Amino acid sequence: MSLPNVRGTLTPNYPLGQESWFRCGGHADLLFEPADFSDLENFLKNYDGDVMVLGGMANTIVRDGGIRGCVIRLGKGFADVKVEGNVITAGAGALNGTVASMAAKNGIGGLEFLSGIPGTVGGALRMNAGAYGMEVKDRLKSATTIDRTAHVRQLKPEQMGMSYRHTDVPEDQIFTQGVFEGVAEDTEIVRARLKDIKAKRNETQPISEQTGGSTFANPDGMKAWELIDRSGCRDLQIGGARMSEKHCNFMINTGNATAADLEDLGDEIIRIVQEKTGVTLCWEIKRLGERS
């Protein structure tokens, strides 16, 4: 298959799993990092193969057999964050924490929760990510997507079917930008809330470990970690993968885990929790590619 001429980078057989937050897993057949929006648009118009879009890979397991086709990763060319009044426009490649910090710097409140969401804006838009009682949909004004035919859409939250850790936006639409609106507040007050969130994360989450954020979504009216703890699965381990003792809804690569170890551990947690409590947990972490 011939590849389009691009201004970004095209890298075959890319060790993608090693760049996930779990630091394990397989290769991508091809990785494309577009220079900017027009570079992405040109590629989509002229590439005939399968594509998959990834951001910061904070909540992603790349299976050991790797990912077929082309993975598109939106990086520096999509990381701009602009402020106008109480509105922040952020590229899909911008870190959620950067958006929260920029908001605080400019005296914009209401976006601090983004600092508790690992990864990038694109991933947060895709899954309506949330933390500390807030979700993306609560502060989103609009999102921009582009599809395989290079058709660009401007979507309002009410058009996106946003619910808990979910949107109805088709997978073939790639998020490239989000526009968020906060409220005017004293900068020091907003910074104090950011500091409090950071302290809570340090106290309750294994953020210094090779982890991927929350493993399972919270069932209606329940907490996944409480179900895991009640089922005796805190600190459960398979191979090099272990559930964190500090926060048992966080999965950890202890140093030598394979992607299969991580996925097998998650599936075993689902089985045990179902057996003990009658509740079926659902993965929040995405598992991509082929098992070896």
Image (cartoon, rainbow, N blue to C red):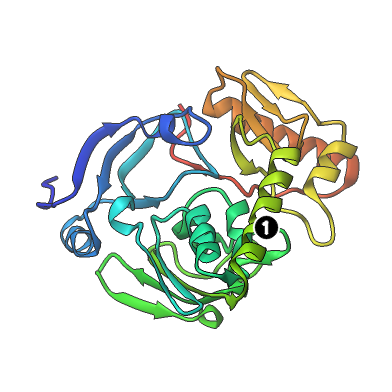
Residue 142 x %, y %: 46, 77
Q: Residue at x 9, y 52 (%)?
A: 5
Figure check: 237 above or below 185: above
Judge by depth and name the residue closer to the eye, 270 or 156: 156
Q: Number of marks in the image? A: 1
On screen, residue 133 versus residue 177, left or right, reads right
Quarter the C terminus occupies: top left
Figure check: 80 above or below 62: below
Density class for disc 1 (Cα within 10 Å; few <14, some 14-19, many ≥20) is: few
Figure check: 190 above or below 292: below
Amino acid type of disc 1? Ala
Q: Residue at x 84, y 55 (%)?
A: 222
Residue assigned mark 1: 192
Judge by depth and name the residue closer to the eye, 113 or 20: 113
Quarter the N terminus occupies: top left
Figure check: 94 above or below 170: above
Judge by depth and name the residue closer to the eye, 240 or 74: 74
On screen, residue 44 versus residue 271, left or right, reads left
Q: Residue at x 63, y 63 (%)?
A: 188
